[in-house]
Image: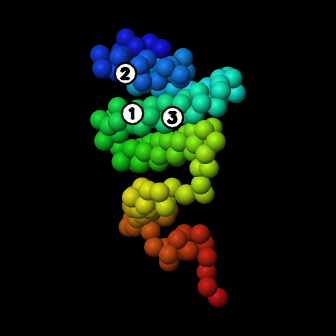
Amino acid sequence: MDRRSLGNAARKRIPDQWPRILRFLWVDSTGVPDGNFTRWSYQAEDRLSPAERAAAYEEWADFFEWRLTQRAAELARDQGKRHLVEKWTDDMTYCCRRCAAWARGEDPGEWVTQSQRRPDLHAEGLAIVAEVIAHVRPRGQDGPASAGSRAESCGSSQA
């Protein structure tokens, strides 16, 4: 891991907080800490005892949440990107925590969809889509799209 571009707090936290996944973490070209969960899963997961696997999954979940907070300033400028990254982070942490429970021999329970776990994210996603759709204009139209103008622009005619 190239820790040169991290602040002092992050330089100390990464090796101390996530020792089981450390070799799969790095700092990308923009200075954002990142990790390769897929490579860890392929190269290391099966070699760990159930207790170590559970602890590693918990580390991944913590890392993903921490990384989201590290990107707050960047994501504040782009609502759509922030929403997608927050949804991805929520899904990854949820899956990692379920896998950790499974590795400990616990029943993680029934799967709960993200819209049930995080109705705030679901509502925000619907609002973003509605805003995008409201600004879509069919060819040849200057105003917001409407059902009638869409049919006309597709060459539909009623007999």
Residue closer to the observer: 97 or 125: 97
Q: Are marks 2 and 1 in contact (CB under 8 Å)?
A: yes
- Which of pointers 2 and 1 lies earlier in the amino acid sequence? 2
Point out residue 151 in the picture as x, y percentages from the top left corner: 56, 74
Q: Quadrant of residue 2?
A: top left
Task: Tell me the quarter of the picture where residue 106 sits.
Answer: top right
How far across and how far down the image is residue 98, in percent? 57, 45
User: Is residue 28 visible in this depiction of the protein?
Assistant: no
Locate residue 24 relative to residue 6 in the image: left or right.
Answer: right
Number of marks present in the image shown: 3
User: How far is the residue under mark 3 from the one under mark 1?
Assistant: 12 Å
- Give left or right: position of 103 versus 138: right
Q: Residue furthest bottom?
A: 159
Name the element at disc 1: helix
Residue that badge 2 annotates: 13
In the figure, 122 relative to 73: above or below?
below
Q: Looking at the image, which residue is at 45% across and 31% down?
A: 63
Checking the image for residue 58, the label placed there is 3
| x and y, in percent, of residue 20 in the image | 53, 22
In the image, what residue occupies the spot 64% across and 42% down?
Answer: 105
Q: Which residue is mark 1?
A: 66
**Residue kind at label 2, given as amino acid type:** Arg
